[in-house]
Amino acid sequence: MRNSRSRLLVLSSFLVLLLAACSAPGIRFATNSETARATTGKAAASATTTVPVPAPTATTVPPITGNIPGSGALAQFQDTLRQIAGLAQTEVVQVNTGSGLGSGIVLDAAGDIVTNAHVVEGASSLTVKTNDGKTFSASLVGSFAQNDLAVIKMSSVDTKLTPAKFADSSKVQVGDVVLAVGSPFGLSDTVTEGIVSATGRTQSEGNGVTLNDLIQTSAPINPGNSGGALVDLNGQVIGIPTLSAPDAQQRGQPAAGIGFAISSNQVVSISQQLVANGSVTHTNRSYLGISSRDDQAGGATVVSVVSGGPSDKAGVKSGWVVTAIGGHDVADSNGLSQVLSGYKPGDKVSVTFRLPDGSSRSLTITLGERPITTP
């Protein structure tokens, strides 16, 4: 009996040491009294004992006081949007053509307004309604259908005009928050919000007009928004909302959340020429001198080469596939236009091609200027 009791004491001591060596969260160590009871045959009774867990109290769970983290930033962001919307509304006007409505952006205090060419095309009369509700007659200064841009001028200015500030659209990034300001369905001073969904888009308007280097946005664009402003969080214009993608399932109705704006760099270049001369003499857009289509294996297949153009002078052949320009990968024809929009006429760039035999070739090409053509 004595030997059995001694062995039990040794075993209990070993168990205590084993429990003490455990450090995993949630393990409760045996107390001295519980160990003593276990050596006298009372372990079974203590095993059924429930140790109460105290309920959470105000002292263990501190109450939430003050502002919830992040609410200050959200309020500040909302205030920023309000300020930008208020400023942009003073820079955008409503354009009435006698047969329809559109929007325009104030270029200067003299009353020059830039809008879309399709807004004023065939207009029987032109009037401009400013943000303060005043209406003025206007006349066409010049139009450039190839870029779907036009400038009109107010006949008199007896109200304060706020000229818009234009950003460098080459710095626009996907994900940027933007506001679209215009007169959709004749509702002047309407502001919608979204993000930049893509850049460098190419989209056909019909009538032989294809627009390049467009900014795609999720900000709703509806009839009447054309010619208005797409502004960034600095309150600067990054583009002119021009068209929406058609929804094939809705018989040509505008697709929700897919709108396109002419980039501000194009707007500035064309509008300055129209104000100065009434016409456009330079597109100021880089030019490879090829026509292309998407290649199934990736890249843009050269369909034809313009005789005497930049690519022709460099030795480019039909059937070659453009895969990169200046180290930037080219996934398709849209990608080709997007990359080219980052260069100026006269820039020398390295263009990489995939040849029909599967080999690669790189050529240095001096970019030309896209010619002015009649749509």
Image (cartoon, rainbow, N blue to C red):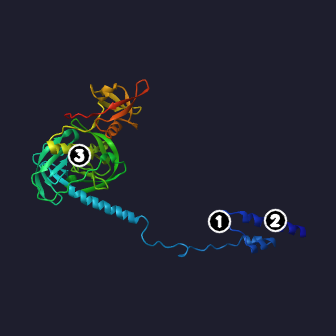
Tag count: 3
Q: Of label 2 and label 1, which has the lower sequence position?
A: 2
Kindly tell me whether residue 154 is visible in this rendering.
yes
Residue found 32% across the figure and 61% down from its top: 80
Quadrant for residue 16, please give it: bottom right
Q: Of label 3 and label 2, which has the lower sequence position?
A: 2
Q: Is residue 197 above or below residue 1?
A: above
Quadrant for residue 248, please give it: top left
Percent of width and height locating residue 363: 37, 29
The one of 80 and 19 positioned closer to us in this rendering:
80
Q: Which mark is residue 11?
A: 2
Instruction: Give the residue at mark 3.
Output: 268
Percent of width and height locating residue 101: 17, 50
Real-space CA distance between mark 2 and mark 1, rounded to the nearest whole angstrom:
24 Å
Real-space CA distance between mark 3 and mark 1, rounded to the nearest whole angstrom:
68 Å
Q: Which element carries disc 2, helix, strand or loop? A: helix
Disc 2 to disc 1: CB gap under 8 Å: no
Residue found 58% across the figure and 74% down from its top: 55
Position of 130 with respect to 297 (left or right) is left
Q: Residues within 10 Å of mark 3 (few under 14, many from 20)?
A: some
User: Which residue type carries mark 1?
Assistant: Gly
Q: Residues within 10 Å of mark 1 (few under 14, many from 20)?
A: few
Percent of width and height locating residue 252: 27, 43
User: Which residue type carries mark 2?
Assistant: Leu
User: Which residue type carries mark 3?
Assistant: Val
Q: Is residue 134 above or below residue 145?
A: below
Q: Of label 3 and label 1, which has the lower sequence position?
A: 1
Q: Which element carries disc 3, helix, strand or loop? A: helix
Residue found 86% across the figure and 69% down from its top: 5
Q: Which mark is residue 26?
A: 1
Q: Is residue 295 above or below residue 250?
A: above
